[in-house]
Amino acid sequence: MDNKVYQLIYRSKALPRLKPEEIVEIIDQANEFNGKMGITGCLVYDRGHFLQLLEGEKDPVDELYRKIEKDSRHSETEVLSTGYTENRIFESWKMGYVALADKSAGEKKELAKNAKNELAKVSTKSDFTSKVYWYNVHSLLTESMYYK
Ligand SMILES: Cc1cc2nc3c(=O)[nH]c(=O)nc-3n(C[C@H](O)[C@H](O)[C@H](O)COP(=O)(O)O)c2cc1C
C-alpha cells in the first residue's frame, strides 16, 4: 500500500449558527496543517452539514480525523468510507472549500454535472471511496432531502 493514497470521507452537522467566517477560519487553519502533512481534500458545506474528503498517508489522515471528530464546531461525525486510491482526487488543493449556499441554481447544476462526470470516470476503477465521494457530492447538490 506504500504508493497508494489513503482516503477518508465523513459527514457531520455544523454547530447551529456557525458563521461563514468561522468556516473560512477552519480552512485557513486546515491549509497550514494539511500542507505540512501532505493532506489534500475538500470540505463541502451546505444547509448546516459538512462533507469532507481527506487524502494522504494513512497515519496522518487518521490522526487528523481523530482531532476533527472532537471539534466542538460540529457534531454527529460519521465516516462514510475509507480506502486506498492510485490518484488523489484533489492533487493541487490543500483543502478545497465549497459553500453550496453561496451558489446560484445554475452553478449548482453545473457542479452536479461535474460530480456525475467524475463519478462515471471513477466507476470504471475499483476505487470505492472516490465513488462514495462523488456520489455524495452529487446527492447533496440534487436531493433536497439528502440530509435529514
Ligand atoms: C468541519 C471541520 C473540518 C476541519 N478540517 C480540518 C482539516 O482538514 N485540517 C486541520 O488541520 N484541521 C481541520 N479542522 C480543525 C480541527 O478540528 C482542529 O481544530 C485543528 O486541527 C487544530 O487542532 P489542535 O488545536 O489540536 O492542533 C476541521 C474542523 C472542522 C469543524
Image (cartoon, grey):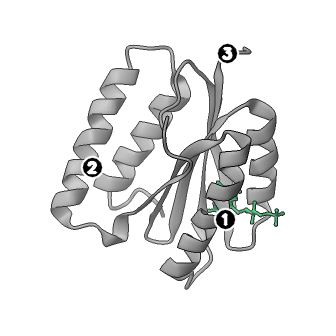
- Residue type, numbered disc 3: Asn
Residue occupied by mark 1: 29
Q: Which mark is residue 111?
A: 2
* Distance between mark 1 and mark 3 Cα atoms: 27 Å
| Labels 1 and 2: the sequence-earlier one | 1
Residue appearing at x 53%, y 83% in the figure: 19
Place residue 86 in its image quadrant: top right
Location of residue 94 in the rendering, given as x and y in whole percent from the top left corner = 56, 48
Q: Is mark 1 within 8 Å of ligand 1?
A: yes
| Labels 2 and 3: the sequence-earlier one | 3
Quarter of the rendered image showing ligand 1? bottom right
| Labels 1 and 3: the sequence-earlier one | 3
* Distance between mark 2 and mark 3 Cα atoms: 30 Å
- Residue type, numbered disc 1: Gln
Location of residue 132 in the rendering, given as x and y in whole percent from the top left corner = 49, 35
* Placement of the N terminus among the 4 image quadrants: top right
Residue occupied by mark 3: 3
Residue appearing at x 27%, y 40% in the figure: 114
Task: State the SS at label 3.
Answer: loop
Q: Nearer the viewer, residue 108 or 12?
A: 108
- Residue type, numbered disc 2: Leu
Mark 1 burial class by Cα count in 10 Å: few <14, some 14-19, many 20+: few
Q: Is mark 2 within 8 Å of ligand 1?
A: no
